Image (cartoon, rainbow, N blue to C red):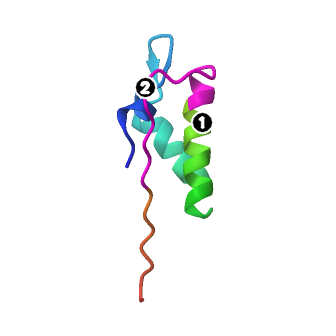
C-alpha cells in the first residue's frame, strides 16, 4: 500500500503512478521489506528529480504460504 505521495510523484505533467510502483516491486520483490520500501521511496524521489511534494507512507506485507 502506498499513499498518494508516491503515486503522484511528478516529473512535469507525468506521474510515477501505479506503473512506477509495479516496476519497482517487480525489481525488488525478493528483497526484504525494508529494502523494498526504501527502493520504492527512492525511485519516486528520483522520478520527481529529488523533491517529493507530498507525504510518503508505505506498507508492505509478505504472506508466506504453507505456514
> Which element is circle 2 on?
loop
Q: Are marks 2 and 1 in contact (CB under 8 Å)?
A: no
Image side of residue 17 versus residue 45, left or right: left
Q: x, y percentage for residue 7?
A: 41, 32
Residue closer to the observer: 44 or 58: 58
User: Is the residue 20 above or below the residue 35 in the image?
Assistant: above
Outermost residue, front direction? Answer: 55
Q: Quadrant for residue 64, please give it.
A: bottom left
Q: x, y percentage for residue 15?
A: 44, 23
**Residue 24, disc:** none
Q: Which of marks 1 and 2 precedes in the sequence?
A: 1
Magenta run includes residue 46: yes
User: Is the residue 30 above or below the residue 14 in the image?
Assistant: below
Which residues are drawn in magenta?
A: 45-59
Query: What residue sits right under mark 2 in the picture?
Result: 54
Disc 2: CA contacts within 10 A as few (<14), some (14-19) or many (>=20): few
Residue at x 47% of width, y 25% of height: 9
> Which element is circle 1 on?
helix
Residue at x 61% of width, y 51% of height: 27
- Report if residue 29 is visible in the image: no
Residue at x 50% of width, y 36% of height: 20
- Which circle, 2 or 1, is nearer the viewer? 2
Residue closer to the observer: 24 or 39: 39
Query: What residue sits right under mark 1 in the picture?
Result: 43
Q: Find the distance from the CA under tag 2 to the CA under tag 1.
A: 15 Å
Q: In which quadrant will I find the C terminus? A: bottom left
Outermost residue, bottom direction? Answer: 67
- Report if residue 9 is visible in the image: yes
Image side of residue 23 versus residue 67, left or right: right
Q: x, y percentage for residue 42?
A: 61, 37
Amino acid at each position: 500500500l502506498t499513499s498518494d505521495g508516491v503515486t503522484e510523484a511528478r516529473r512535469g505533467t507525468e506521474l510515477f503512478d501505479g506503473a512506477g510502483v509495479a516496476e519497482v516491486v517487480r525489481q525488488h520483490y525478493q528483497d526484504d521489506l525494508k529494502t523494498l520500501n526504501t527502493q520504492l521511496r527512492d525511485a519516486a524521489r528520483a522520478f520527481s528529480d529529488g523533491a517529493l511534494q507530498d507525504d510518503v507512507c508505505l506498507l508492505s506485507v509478505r504472506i508466506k504460504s504453507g505456514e
